[in-house]
Image (spheres, rainbow, N blue to C red):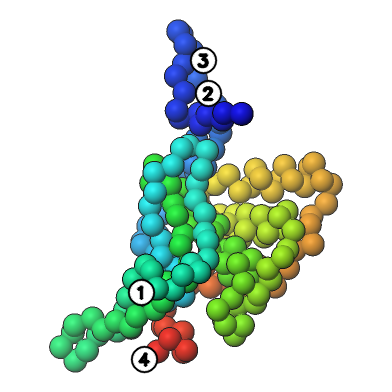
């Protein structure tokens, strides 16, 4: 069976416009992101997360995967400060995860996507390189993983006044299932605090990564 992306199809004569939630389901409705986007991308390097833009159809926002082969790609360079001459000082961090973001998204939607995917990481859905950093919670049901990631994206983006599709996902889930899945509020709050900090300031390297 062939499946077409909405953005790859052509309309007939005098077509009715598609609803925004169909044509661009991952776009935000209103709100603006500031320096949080670039700051989060930079801070993600300290945990070995390489964030890349990739051309995708309108029905795809992004994804994160473990990088099993440590020999490629090249390690990431994370700034730890400046020397006495004011020159930046870097450490190398092995690339552990690849986070892909649809380059066709707006800055705001890119930020929401990055927050969502980092939520999967820091809630332990992909495991952990060190149990002192965040827990290993691999093997959770899909609905638990998605509800945790969407909840975290909703909380963080709402605090930044970015109206995003996570609210609709959460309300639809509860309306259909009549209950909330067995999520970990502790993991959501800890991961949320970390991701918020990643957008606010430059973080120090993990102790085990310091040279």
Instruction: Identify which residue, 9 or 106, lies in the foreground.
Output: 9
Question: Which residue is the site of mark 3?
Answer: 16
Task: Say the numbered circle drawn on residue 211.
Answer: 4
- Which residue is denoted by mark 1 in the rendering? 75
Q: Quadrant of the C terminus?
A: bottom left
Q: Is residue 181 visible?
A: yes
Q: Earlier in the sequence, mark 2 or mark 4?
A: 2
Q: What crowding class fits label 4: few (fewer than 14 Cα within 10 Å), some (14-19), or many (20 or more)?
A: few
- Is disc 2 in contact with disc 3, using a CB cutoff of under 8 Å? yes
Q: Is residue 1 left or right of 15 when viewed as pictured?
A: right
- In the depicted structure, whether residue 200 falls above or below residue 51: below
For label 2, count other residues whose C-alpha is less than 10 Å away and answer few (under 14), some (14-19) or many (20+).
few
Q: Residue 62, image x and y in percent?
A: 49, 51
Q: In this rendering, does residue 202 appear at all?
A: no
Distance from Cα at disc 2 to Cα at disc 4: 53 Å
Who's the residue at 43% across and 86% down the image?
Answer: 209
Mark-to-mark CA distance, 4 and 3? 59 Å
Q: Residues within 10 Å of mark 3 (few under 14, many from 20)?
A: few
Determine whether label 1 and label 2 are within 8 Å by CB: no
Residue linked to disc 2: 18
The residue at 66%/55% (across/down) is 146
């Amino acid at each position: 069976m062939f499946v077409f992306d909405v953005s790859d199809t052509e309309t007939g004569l005098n077509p009715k416009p598609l609803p925004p939630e169909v044509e661009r389901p991952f776009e935000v409705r209103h709100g603006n992101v500031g320096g949080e986007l670039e700051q989060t991308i930079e801070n993600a390097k300290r945990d070995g997360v390489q964030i890349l833009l990739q051309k995708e159809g309108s029905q795809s926002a992004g994804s994160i995967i473990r990088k099993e082969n440590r020999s490629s790609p090249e390690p990431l360079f994370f700034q730890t400060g400046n020397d006495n001459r004011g020159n930046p000082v870097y450490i190398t961090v092995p690339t552990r995860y690849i986070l892909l973001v649809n380059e066709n998204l707006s800055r705001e939607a890119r930020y929401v996507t990055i927050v969502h995917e980092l939520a999967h990481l820091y809630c332990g859905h992909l495991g952990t390189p060190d149990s002192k950093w965040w827990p290993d919670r691999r093997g959770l049901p899909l609905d638990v993983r998605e509800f945790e990631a969407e909840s975290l994206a909703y909380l963080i983006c709402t605090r930044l006044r970015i109206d995003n599709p996570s609210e609709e996902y959460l309300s639809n889930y509860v309306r259909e299932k009549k209950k909330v899945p067995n999520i970990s509020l502790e993991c959501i709050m800890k991961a949320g605090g970390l991701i918020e900090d990643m957008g606010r300031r430059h973080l120090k390297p993990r102790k085990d990564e310091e040279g």
